[in-house]
Amino acid sequence: MFGLLNKFKNSLQKTTQKLWGSLRGVFGFKALDAQSLETLEEALYGADFGVQTTQEILEEISTAYKADRSFQPLEATLIGSRILKQVLANAEGTFTKQNNPEVICLIGINGAGKTTTAAKLAYYLKNQGHSIILGACDTFRAAANEQIQSWANRLDIPLVSSHQGADSAAVAFDTYQAALSRKADIVILDTAGRLHTKLNLMEELRKVRKVLRKQDTQAPHHSWLVIDASLGSNSIEQARTFHKEFGLTGLIITKLDGTSRGGALVAIYRELKIPIYFVGLGESPDDLQPFSTNNYVDAIFGDHE
């Protein structure tokens, strides 16, 4: 657990450095005045926690300081930590397998990291004792097959793929059938990236779902949106649209290690209440980890246990 907390801390360094770097001196020897509160506000907005959460933290810190002028920085972190944990209550998605095979469909916009996430998720679940088969349903992007094939070879994960321009729904069907014949218990489908505003591409996702439901009326059992953390709270609109069009059951937040806007998942969860299953904490295969509210918040505001 300590090692995983360190992984979260290392991944969120850019967020914490931006947040706390701009706060040096706010809680120093001078009074907590309008200027220092403005500095605090800018720092919280910069981390992309969202308007509501930022205002809640600001109001509580301001109230606490007015009540006790000896208010210390540690107390501010305690307030921030408590509020984030309240906002993220029930945010942790817990993966449970109930079907044979269990089908996970990864969707999202171009560049979110779906292909590498699909491979890392397969690797994680394989290490949990599951038998996995990957489906390369991104038949639109040039070199997509080569990318996922490279990951599959590297991690020793079976893969079903086709040629560029092939019917992605047919690949989903073939992957499901391969899982049945090989007795694989989890299917992970990597779909093509698409803008949430392109309804014709959203129709392709519905076609994949339709084909799967001819095999299992509940499939896909998990529809997870992969979100690039560096997009910040701008991801809320894409998540809202995908949820409306496809019915999301979970989120995976990638590239937390590459952004100073790591607070965005707070705003996204607060808005949509879609559970967060995994987060990307780096580039290595084992850097995709289950989301932990405590580890996430403690990495930002400190572990005060």
Image: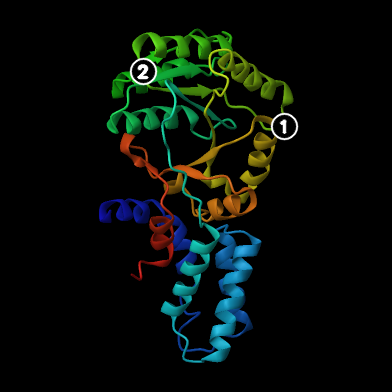
Pointer 1 local density, CA inside 10 Å: few below 14, some 14–19, many at least 20: few
The residue identified by callout 2 is: 184
- Residue 3 in picture, x, y percent from top left: 26, 52
Residue 67, position as x, y percentages in the image: 55, 90
- The answer to which of marks 1 and 2 sits earlier in the sequence is 2
Crowding near pointer 2: few (<14 within 10 Å), some, many (20+)? some
- Residue that label 1 marks: 197
Query: Which residue is rendered at x = 47% and y = 14% of the image?
Result: 176
| Quarter of the image where one finds residue 301 | bottom left
Q: Position of residue 8 (x, y in %)?
A: 37, 53
Q: Is residue 243 visible?
A: yes
Callout 1: SS: loop
Q: Residue at x 62, y 59 (%)?
A: 50
**Residue type marked 1:** Thr
Can you say whether 174 is above or below 276 in the image? above
- Element class at badge 2: loop
